[in-house]
Image: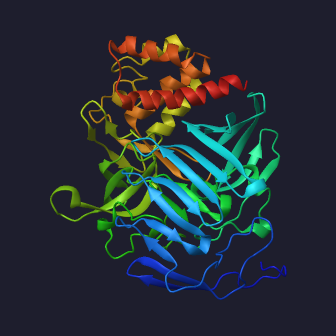
Amino acid sequence: MNNQKHYGLIDSLVITRNGNQLKTIEDHAVKQLTYTGASDFFDGYSSNSEYSYNANGALSMDRNRYINQINYDYLGNMRNVIFGNHNLIEYIYAADGTKLRAIHRSLGGSNSYIDSIDYVGNLIIKNGQPSMYLFDGGYASFNTNGAVDGWHYYVQDCMGNNRMVVNSNGTVEQVTHYYPFGGVIGDISTNENLQKYKFEGKELDRTFGLDNYDIHARQYFAMAPMWDRIDPLAEDTPQFSPYSYCMGNPVNLGDYNGESTRVVKIDSTHYQVVGGDINDGDNNIYVCIDTGKEGEDRYENTWFSIGITPTMTSFYNSDSNQWKGKIDVNDNSGYNYIKKLESDEPSLLSYCIKAQTGELYDFKETNGEEGKSREDHYRGMPFGTTTDGTTVYSSARDIGNITIGYICGAKGEPWSVVRIMFDRYQGESEGISSQNAQRLGWSIGIKNFLHR
């Protein structure tokens, strides 16, 4: 919608590039939308060279956004953004690329101010006070005394975008609609500033006109649309610009965090796990093409996802450092096992007895059927669906570990006690693959226990 409250052109961009890098952008539509929450490209400068990049291919100047200079650390993480109007954004990152702090400084005389945001795991601290605690599917908010004052839940679309925020009373608190590349449709969205996690569930920073989504390894400017740095996997798709967002096809594809679990298609119902990345924060299961080449270039990622995993290590054996498993999309034994547990309602003691090796509840071994024995503990199967209909595929080993974690949480057992109990039961500290699944199950169980 334009400034006259009529539907029409809001952007008509003429983009000039130097190779793959931006050189100039001219907007032949209305210069700037003025209503609250408007999301459009602002043509703030006109010259033959409006953008610059450093020797590593990272954006270092954007005159249309009045960005005079962007500096990066030795690991390629953004260090600061210096604006021409006396504004400054500073960042602090850990060695592994995790963002720890963002500081916004406005140095404009009497209107000067400073605010800071600290990222402590899932806890967001603003100006020294707890602000949000993020969890899968929503967040908890805090009052000025540091106490939780509300629970808020995301309603997502099929691409994982947060479309609504609903509180525990069922009240809709925020509505966000998007253009295909992630820009916010401001005239039909509501309460924009309630929370910043929006497109693909990523944080949108609109301070000083930055308008970037922080997608961990890089930042994404949806108005152009473009990434600020080169795709670290650009050599896998040389036919596409290393700055393009999801190969220019945002309706069918999503640019998430990395490779996650990778599979090759065997037939219409089976996929073989061939690799992945347990540290990229992306639970998608991406289909790859076997090129027949040797080494790292053998599997080419299509970025088509068949679903997600419940944990980053569902098909990863942390004891042997190997990716394992074959997914059967028609194997309903995981569903049937959960239904059986719901019917049996075993006590914690009863479950532990029947979960010993080869017993009924040792799902990875028996598939929940007495007298059965399976060799492949990493066989994959559908385990459920998310609120937006995405299928969750889990290994048999994860299903067993999630289940025991859930039962302990549902009984109100503290995680510290549960962790010690599991390790003592095994006679040693369990691997990260088992721990991740048990912790996930426990977190679901304890949530149900606390909300009884």
Is residue 377 visible from the viewing direction of this image? yes
Q: Please give the name of the residue rendered at 35% of the width and 47% of the height, measured from the top-left corner.
A: 277
Q: Quadrant of the N terminus?
A: bottom right
Q: Quadrant of the C terminus?
A: top right
Q: Is residue 6 left or right of residue 262?
A: right
Residue 356: percent from the left, percent from the top? Answer: 37, 16
Residue 422: percent from the left, percent from the top? Answer: 42, 16
Residue 181: percent from the left, percent from the top? Answer: 58, 70
The coloring applied to the image is rainbow
Residue 82: percent from the left, percent from the top? Answer: 56, 60
Q: Quadrant of residue 318?
A: top left
Q: How many marks?
A: 0
Residue 91 in the image: above or below residue 247: above
Q: Please give the name of the residue rendered at 80% of the width and 66% of the height, measured from the top-left corner.
A: 36
Is residue 137 visible from the viewing direction of this image? no
Residue 163 in the image: above or below residue 383: below
Q: Please give the name of the residue rendered at 38% of the width and 11% of the height, measured from the top-left corner.
A: 424
- The outermost residue toward the front is 109
Q: Is residue 413 left or right of residue 172?
A: left
Q: Is residue 321 left or right of residue 75?
A: left
Q: Of residues 27 and 332, which is closer to you in this image? A: 27
Q: Of residues 429 and 354, which is closer to you in this image? A: 429
- The outermost residue toward the left is 294
Q: Is residue 22 left or right of residue 259?
A: right
